C-alpha cells in the first residue's frame, strides 16, 4: 500500500494530544481516508505509557480483532468500516474512513453527538443489537471507536470482544489495559453488580458494567436502552 501514514491522536481539552488507543498503534493516512490498526507496541506512539507489553497478550488481541471485524464485515457490513486490507505479517488492518473519529469530531467532550451525527444514538443501538444477535459481548465502547462514513456510524476495536464459547475472565485480567480514568469509575459499579475483581465473571455482567461505566461518554438514556438489549436477571 503506497498511502503515507502518520500517528493518529485525539486532541482532548485540557490534556492535549492523547493516544487514540491504549493497545495497538493508531495510524491515519495523510488524506484521512484510511485508518490503520497496527497491533505493534510502538514506543514512539505510546510514549512510554505502553499498557500491553506482553507479546502473547498483543497476539491474543490481534486475533480477536481479526476474528470479529471479519465476522461483522460479513454479517453486518453496514456497521463496520470497509476492510481495505489485512496485513497478517505486520499485524495491520486497513479500514476505509471519511475523516477523524466521532469523538474527535465532537471535540473530545460531551455525551451527545447530535451535532456530528443527528441520529447517532439510534445507530449505536442498532450496532449493539447486531452484536447481541451474533452472541458478541463488546467491552470497548469509547466514542473514539466509531467513525462516521457517509452518514453511517461504523464501529471498530473488537480486541475486547468475547462470546459464551470463551472461558470466563476476571476483571483483574483486564485492568492493565483499561484507562486509569475509567478504572476509577469501576469499583462502586462492580460492587453493585456483585462482581469480584479476582474471580471469573459471566460476560453479560461485564457487558452491563461496560454500559454503566460508559455513561461518562454517552447519554444515560442510550446506555440504559443498550442494557435492555443484553439484560438478564441478576
Image (spheres, rainbow, N blue to C red):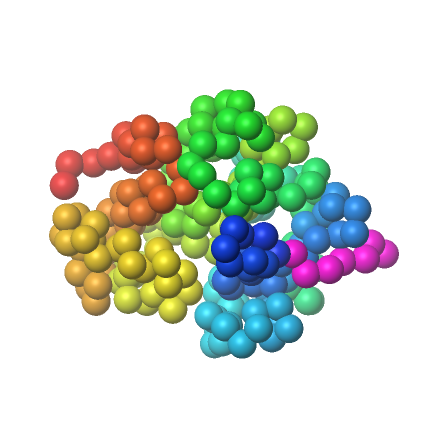
Of the pair 124 and 49, the residue shown nearer to us:
49
Of the pair 106 and 146, the residue shown nearer to us:
106
Quarter holding residue 101:
top right
Q: How many marks?
A: 0
Q: In screen coordinates, is 173 left or right of 128? A: left
Q: Residue at x 49, y 76 (%)?
A: 53
Q: Residue at x 51, y 58 (%)?
A: 15
Quarter holding residue 208:
top left
Q: In screen coordinates, is 81 left or right of 84? A: left
Q: In screen coordinates, is 33 left or right of 128? A: right
User: Which residue occupies the extreme right position in the image?
Assistant: 2
The residue segment tinted magenta is 1-8
Of the pair 88 and 79, the residue shown nearer to us:
79
Q: Residue at x 50, y 32 (%)?
A: 113
- Quarter holding the C terminus is top left
Of the pair 107 and 7, the residue shown nearer to us:
107
User: Which residue occupies the extreme front position in the image?
Assistant: 14
- Quarter holding the N terminus is bottom right
From this view, report whether residue 41 is shown above or below residue 8: below
Q: Position of residue 92 (x, y in %)?
A: 66, 60
Tell whether position 25 is magenta.
Answer: no
Q: Position of residue 148 (x, y in %)?
A: 61, 34
Viewer can see residue 226: no
Q: Position of residue 62 (x, y in %)?
A: 54, 61
Viewer can see residue 100: yes
Q: Residue at x 17, y 48 (%)?
A: 193
From this view, report whether residue 27 is shown above or below residue 80: below
Secondary structure mostly seen in the magenta stretch: loop
Q: Position of residue 228 (x, y in %)?
A: 28, 30
Q: In screen coordinates, is 212 left or right of 92? A: left
From this view, report whether residue 193 is shown above or below residue 187: above
Amino acid at each position: 500500500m503506497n498511502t503515507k501514514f502518520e500517528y493518529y491522536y485525539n486532541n482532548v481539552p485540557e490534556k492535549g494530544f492523547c493516544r487514540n488507543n491504549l493497545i495497538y498503534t493508531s495510524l491515519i493516512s495523510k488524506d484521512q481516508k484510511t485508518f490503520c490498526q497496527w497491533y505493534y507496541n510502538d514506543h514512539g506512539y505510546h510514549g512510554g505509557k505502553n499498557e500491553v507489553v506482553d507479546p502473547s497478550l498483543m497476539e491474543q488481541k490481534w486475533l480477536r480483532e481479526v476474528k470479529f471485524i471479519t465476522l461483522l464485515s460479513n454479517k453486518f457490513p453496514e456497521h463496520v468500516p470497509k476492510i481495505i486490507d489485512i496485513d497478517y505479517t505486520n499485524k495491520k488492518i486497513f479500514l476505509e474512513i471519511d475523516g477523524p473519529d466521532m469523538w474527535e469530531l465532537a471535540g473530545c467532550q460531551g455525551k451527545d453527538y447530535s451535532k456530528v451525527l443527528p441520529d447517532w444514538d439510534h445507530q449505536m443501538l442498532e450496532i449493539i443489537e447486531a452484536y447481541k444477535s451474533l452472541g458478541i459481548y463488546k467491552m470497548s465502547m469509547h466514542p473514539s471507536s466509531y467513525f462516521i462514513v457517509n452518514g453511517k456510524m461504523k464501529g471498530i476495536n473488537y480486541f475486547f470482544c468475547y462470546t459464551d464459547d470463551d472461558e470466563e475472565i476476571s476483571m483483574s485480567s483486564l485492568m492493565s489495559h483499561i484507562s486509569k480514568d475509567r478504572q476509577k469509575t469501576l469499583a462502586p459499579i462492580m460492587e453493585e453488580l456483585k462482581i469480584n475483581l479476582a474471580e471469573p465473571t459471566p460476560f453479560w455482567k461485564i457487558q452491563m458494567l461496560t454500559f454503566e461505566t460508559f455513561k461518562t461518554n454517552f447519554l444515560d438514556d442510550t446506555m440504559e436502552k443498550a442494557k435492555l438489549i443484553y439484560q438478564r436477571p441478576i
